[in-house]
Amino acid sequence: MRSTITRREIFNSAHRLFKPELSDEENIKLFGKCAYPNYHGHNYELHVTLTGDIDPYTGFVYDIADLKKIINEEVIEPFDHRNLNLDTTEFSALNPTVENICVVIYQKLRPRIDSKFDLKIRVYETIRNYSEFPV
Ligand code: NI
């Protein structure tokens, strides 16, 4: 029987949304407060959902301890208490919008999880805004 298991994690990161070819005023017009030059933080909430068959022996779709370890290595360690623009290679030239953060996390986790499981990433940037990937 197919089912899902979701691991929820929190990471706190700084970011700035901007295009280097635009002035500060133009960036703030395009990206709002997230373009302020000196960076700011968000408390990101990550939901990683795996879909697959329930193992009839364990009753698990996926061992949550294994999933926790993979998320910690691929997302929490490199992103938590970091500046996404300055401290990561993924966002050195890619705007760290919540949409792009979702895609990057998917790309980092997908190779670590057997392809027999479907993988869905949801990231909340605020309690009101979130993105999901893949669609
Ligand atoms: Ni922001």
Image: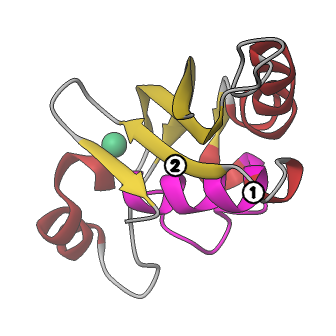
| Residue at which label 2 appears | 120
Q: Dividing the picture into quarters, in which one does residue 79 lie?
A: top right
Picture coordinates of residue 22, whole percent (x, y): 33, 83
- The tally of labels here is 2
The foreground one among 53 and 93 is 53
Picture coordinates of residue 133, whole percent (x, y): 45, 58
Q: Residue at x 26, y 70 (%)?
A: 27
Q: Amino acid at mark 1?
A: Arg
Q: Secondary structure at mark 2?
A: strand
Q: Is residue 120 above or below residue 68?
A: below
The foreground one among 11 and 115 is 115
Question: Quick one: quadrant of the N terminus?
Answer: top right
* Dot 1 or dot 2, earlier in sequence: 1
| Residue at which label 1 appears | 110
Q: Is residue 82 above or below residue 26?
A: above
Picture coordinates of residue 40, whole percent (x, y): 41, 34
Q: Secondary structure at mark 1?
A: helix
Q: Residue at x 52, y 53 (%)?
A: 101
Q: Indicate the quadrant of ligand 1 in the picture.
A: top left
Residue 36 shows up from this direction: no
Q: Residue at x 67, y 27 (%)?
A: 54
The foreground one among 62 and 26 is 62
Q: Is residue 19 above or below residue 113?
A: below
Residue 43 shows up from this direction: yes
Q: Residue at x 70, y 62 (%)?
A: 107
Q: Amino acid at mark 2?
A: Lys
Is 72 magenta? The answer is no
Residue range of the region highlighted in magenta in the rendering: 87-109
The foreground one among 35 and 112 is 112
Q: Dividing the picture into quarters, in which one does residue 83 lie?
A: top right
